[in-house]
Amino acid sequence: MLQKYIEGLKGKTVAVIGAGVSNAPLIKLLCENGVATNVYDKKERESFDPAFAEYLSSRGASLFCGENYLDDVRGDVIFRSPGVRPDAPSIIKAQKGGACVTSEMELFFELCPCPIIAVTGSDGKTTTSTLISELLREQGFNVHLGGNIGEPLLCRIPEISPADRAVVELSSFQLFDMKRSPHVAAITNVTPNHLDWHKDMDEYAESKFNVLRYQSEEDIAVLNADDGRCRGFAGRAESKTRFFSLKDPGAFAHFDGADIYLDGEKLMAGKDLKIPGAHNIANFMTACAAVYGEVKRENMVKVAKSFSGVEHRIEFVRETGGAKYYNDSIGSSPTRTIAGLKCFGGRMILIAGGYDKHIPFDELGDEICKRVSTLILCGATADKIEAAVRNSGVSKKPEIITCGTLEKAVEAARGKALPGDTVLFSPACASFDRFPNFMARGRAFKDIVNKL
């Protein structure tokens, strides 16, 4: 199917916007099949790997890069990078001229021969997607995990059989203009995020709803009953709804404070879930609801007791000086960091701050006052987080220290940490002010802590 599609592009010009991880295999596939290809990327030419630039040149592909890379996008078919808005003037102009605008993920949905389970939401996407893949593997399925997590899946289509399962994590950027929906769609929650890219909260929420928009009555939507926007989505979707909840005993999957229930029957005790925190109980229930009917209950319990989590998500790094250090670099929004704070008791030192996504920190400020003894801030949002803490209605305030670098922040944490303390690195912000992504940020934190 994929090769047939590529053959159909010969004689046309294909524009690929973005030469990053999600589009690199596609660019290679097009070039190796002799498709006329134009590659557009914001990076300056000298920032590219010389071997990559030489590869494009040797294949007859053209590279347009630099600050004005989107000024004149040309192609009969345009593959949009998730980070580029589809209403960019040059893309709109190309569409009016007859160009077809698509994406690596949209084409994967069109060509994938097996059922697709997709996960989106503001928090918990990666853990939930990974849990779903582990549940399906435990049941014996051959699983392909990708999308916003791991490697792009489009070029792996020749390896996928109809009996397999594809599990994809989708961001609001990927979903923004999607015209296809999966057989099973799960939305973990919808809270303010990426408001530096989206025009407003309504646009962000509508992007999330796109994962359900094109489902049929035979498809399944797994939604968070404790989230107002998710509950509202249920009334607009044509698919069958399975709610999960930490509060509502009538939900398809619910937690009563002690036990996890699935379709009216007790599945297991919540304390037996290996990964900590109420938010991870919610993630596990989401995953179980998504695979219900395909995965046996005993296999769900087996995965729950063995799954140790995903890197950069409340990841234990080491104990030194009697204090335990945790890497939660995935905490790129206030709600994510709040969930991390709720996983621990006792004295806590929080390291936070990063790139400004224009998300309010008021609720985070309250939780910091309730749970944190020392707050160490660095990055572009340090002043905003500090203001939220100082303006909080919670009377108890933490000590606040501002540092210029992550290295100094960790040193400050070590200086304040007492035996029995928890040091949590959960920035509540994106990493783009100083790191290319949250993974690089998390690895940097771990390297610093391991050198203490």
Image (spheres, helix red, strand yellow):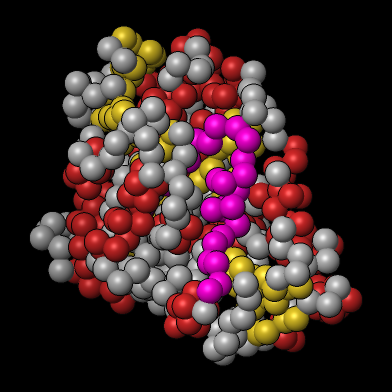
Q: Please tell me whether residue 87 is drawn above or below residue 397 in the rendered image.
A: below
Q: Does the magenta stretch include residue 263?
A: no
Q: In this view, does 401 lie to the left or right of 201?
A: right
Which residue is nearer to you in this view: 222 or 320?
A: 222
Q: Does the magenta stretch include residue 108?
A: yes
Q: Where is residue 198 in the image (x, y as percent from the top left)?
A: 34, 69
Give the residue drawn at x 44%, y 33%: 184
Q: Quadrant of residue 32?
A: bottom right
Q: Position of residue 390 (x, y in %)?
A: 19, 69
Residue 93 visible (yes or no): yes
Which residue is nearer to you in this view: 113 or 430?
A: 113
Mark count:
0
Q: Position of residue 134 (x, y in %)?
A: 58, 28
Q: In this view, does 160 lie to the left or right of 307?
A: right
Residue 420 visible (yes or no): no
Q: Quadrant of residue 21?
A: bottom right
Q: Please tell me whether residue 439 is drawn above or below residue 276 in the rendered image.
A: below
Q: Quadrant of the C terminus?
A: bottom right
Give the residue drawn at x 58%, y 82%: 73
Give the residue drawn at x 34%, y 46%: 213
Q: In which quarter of the image is the N terminus?
A: top right
Give the residue drawn at x 59%, y 52%: 107
Q: Please tell me whether residue 1 is drawn above or below residue 220 in the rendered image.
A: below
Q: Where is residue 52 in the image (x, y as percent from the top left)?
A: 81, 73
Most extreme residue toward the right is: 58
Q: Is residue 419 left or right of residue 100?
A: left
What segment carries the magenta color? 98-122
Which residue is nearer to you in this view: 336 or 66?
A: 66
